[in-house]
Image: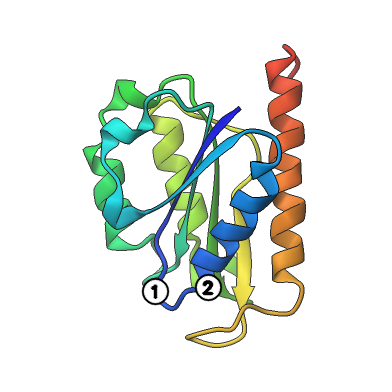
Amino acid sequence: MKVLIIYDSTFGNTEKIARVIAKTLGGFGEVRLSHIDKMNPLDLEGIDILIIGCPIQRHKPTLGIRDFLEQVSKGTLKGFLAATFDTRYRMPRWKSGSAAHVIAKKLRKRGCSLLLSPESFFVAGKEGPLEYKERDRAVNWARMILEKYNITAEGGV
């Protein structure tokens, strides 16, 4: 299993979640973790699972993530398995927005299949820190990705 985790992080909270996910999945295959500033669409070749996460900025993904997704041609992601996450305040999604849902929609339009529904991890304040137990939730979310991938790889769902 080859996983690429792309993240953007303003205050370091999203990076912390991305690193927890990478560490959890790292015991089961090759995992690359990359900040969006270091990404090129050509880096997508040869991966099995694409995970993208960022904080919410004005109800949307960060500009870096949006720009990257616009650079990726539609056929490039056809058949990819993906998962998306964001970091945000704990409030109703309709009020805060969801970067993860926007990213997921863009990935589906480009041919990806989502392994899980988009996920939000919560911060206690504008600059963080992450709320209590969010790292534990990230470990569990990564394990669910692994479980769904194994079912898919075996010809199931």
Tell me, yes or no, if residue 91 can be seen here.
no
Q: Secondary structure at mark 2?
A: helix
Asked if labels 2 and 1 touch by Cβ distance under 8 angstroms, the answer is yes
Q: CA distance from mark 1 to mark 2?
A: 8 Å
Residue that appears at 61% across and 62% down: 120
User: Which residue is disc 1 drawn over?
Assistant: 10
User: Which residue is disc 2 drawn over?
Assistant: 13
Residue that appears at 26% across and 41% down: 40
Specify the label residue 102 is tagged with: none
Nearer-the-camera pick, 57 or 147: 147
Q: Secondary structure at mark 1?
A: loop
Residue type at the position of mark 2: Asn
Left/right placement of residue 106 relative to residue 14 reads left
Residue type at the position of mark 1: Thr
For mark 2, does the 10 Å Cα neighbourhood hold few (<14), some (14 to 19), or many (20 or more) residues? many
User: Where 103 falls versus 30 (above or below)?
Assistant: below
Residue that appears at 62% across and 85% down: 124
Q: Position of residue 118 (x, y in %)?
A: 59, 49
Q: Position of residue 27 (x, y in %)?
A: 70, 41
- The image shows a total of numbered marks equal to 2
User: Where 61 falls versus 124 (above or below)?
Assistant: above
For mark 1, does the 10 Å Cα neighbourhood hold few (<14), some (14 to 19), or many (20 or more) residues? some
Tell me, yes or no, if residue 52 can be seen here.
yes
Q: Position of residue 60 (x, y in %)?
A: 39, 62
